Amino acid sequence: MPEINIILGPPGTGKTENLLRIMDRELKEKTADPGEIAFVTFTTKAANEASKRAQEKFNLTEDDLPYFSTLHAFGKRQLGMNNSEVMRVADYRKMADLYGIDLEYVTQDWEDTGIIHTDNKFIREINKARTKCMELDEYYNASYFNFDLYDLLKVSKSLEEFKHKNNKYDFTDMLTQWVKFGPTPKLEVVFIDEAQDLTRLQWSMCEKIWKNAKRVYISGDDDQAIYRWAGADIEYFINLKGKVTTLEYSYRCPQAVHEVASSIVSRIGNRREKIWNPRKEKGLVELHSFADSVDLSSGKWLVLATCGYMFKEIEENLQYKGLPYKIKNKLPVDEEILSAVDAWKKLQKGENLSYEEVGYIYSYLPTKTGVAHGYKGLKSLNEDETYDLEQLVMNHGLCTSSEHWDEVFEKIGSRNINYIKSLEKINPTLSTEPNISLSTIHMAKGGECDNVMLLTDLSPANQEEMAINPDDTNRAFYVAVTRAKRQLHIVDSQSYGGFEI
């Protein structure tokens, strides 16, 4: 059996950095060959960063570090699967059409968790059962569903039949197939990050990966485990035996935020006890009756809620005030529209545009009245040259003479037009990085911000979950408040039922 080292990292204590320092030491002291070290993470980004760090510090190549990856990528590589064999969105749609399965949308975190997001409840539950290493009938009998087992089994049979006939594998297959049939690599040291989010199936894979290793370093925080809904096995991490080290100092949370976080975490029943200390700064926590009483106009802000629909009024307020923001890491207006508007204003000022900027403008101009036939594809332009208004009109098909972008651009919608005009009043240059980000709590996990505004509303589903399993809701709000580096602004619930902080 390997030596198991468990590193508990409360919010902002640098658990990933600590793991990387241990990796540095193993490589520096040459206690293991680089090809005998596995660094398994929850996200592709984290795996790539660990690999890049090792390459730069120790003059290694990517080929020297074959086991730095997500678990899905690990299984896929070990089994020799190629990208053409992986189930994609188009495959799920084709399968649904073929077997008469209701499916409006389906997405998947292709490079990271492998979690399927879909409106088809059967596909969701099938995948969840598999991640829990449970047979469908066993999983069904252990849960409460408003549908028949027969319907669940029927969809499962259709999905498996489609994959078999088309030689396709989903992300869960990458794990199950390797656990059953994959070769166990010869490893000396294994690192596992964000372990609190691993499913039972992923833990089975980890057990096989570290089977013949000498040392295993497992980093995580059960208080920040918020993926139980996707199959995460929190109890496995809580009950894992080994040498435990707790990182005790947070580089993120000030004292006032730490007090709120401590109050929330004390409500979690099943957890590993741990003590951690905040930064010396006092920080600020304020309570608000309404979201619009929080001034978001200066500084960097992260606005958090349990569900995306709760941002509706905040979005309307931000658009009215002309404050730039992102929601779920995307701009509310297509970035190319903003670039087109900026380019048009430059053109009207007599400035030259690049090939790319002309492309933005032409893509939103109507044919005939905006751009002459044959010019919209930019075939008359040279990619290495710049162009002024006169050149575009005389030689490259520009037909319109209006100074106002809102009079010439097509298909951008009145709402976009009104918001862009509001933005222009505050910031003449539109294509700048917003200081306000609206995000669900789950999407913000791992992030941080100087100022955090937290909406405490609970959806009906949240309220139901709170009644059944309050630990999960407490963990979610614990994660939320601990994103704040300086100020935390807590907004009372605007609907019936909310989280009491």
Image (tube, rainbow, N blue to C red):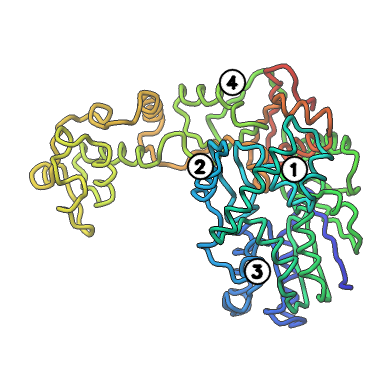
The residues bearing labels 4 and 1 have C-alpha atoms spaced at a distance of 28 Å
Residue marked by disc 1: 226
Q: Is residue 227 visible?
A: yes
Drawn side of residue 364 relative to residue 260, left or right: left
Q: Look at discs 3 and 4 and give the one toward the viewer.
A: 3
Q: Are marks 1 and 2 in contact (CB under 8 Å)?
A: no
Dot 1 lies on which element? loop
The residues bearing labels 3 and 4 have C-alpha atoms spaced at a distance of 45 Å
Give percent across and percent down for residue 492.
Answer: 71, 21
In the picture shown, does residue 415 fall above or below 221? above
The residues bearing labels 2 and 3 have C-alpha atoms spaced at a distance of 38 Å
Give the numbered dot on residue 97.
2
Which kind of residue does numbered mark 3 sit on?
A: Phe
Label 2 packing within 10 angstroms: few (<14), some (14-19), many (20+): few
**Which is nearer the eye, 111 or 180?**
180
Residue marked by disc 4: 292
Q: Is residue 45 visible?
A: no
In the picture shown, does residue 490 fall above or below 43? above
Q: Earlier in the sequence, mark 4 or mark 1?
A: 1
Give percent across and percent down for residue 104.
Answer: 53, 36
Q: Quadrant of residue 258?
A: top right
Q: Look at discs 1 and 2 and give the one toward the viewer.
A: 2
Which kind of residue does numbered mark 4 sit on?
A: Asp
Give percent across and percent down for residue 320.
Answer: 46, 21
Q: Look at discs 2 and 3 and give the one toward the viewer.
A: 2
Which kind of residue does numbered mark 1 sit on?
A: Ile
Give the numbered dot on residue 68.
3
Q: Earlier in the sequence, mark 2 or mark 3?
A: 3
The residues bearing labels 1 and 2 have C-alpha atoms spaced at a distance of 33 Å
The residues bearing labels 4 and 2 have C-alpha atoms spaced at a distance of 46 Å
Q: Earlier in the sequence, mark 1 or mark 3?
A: 3
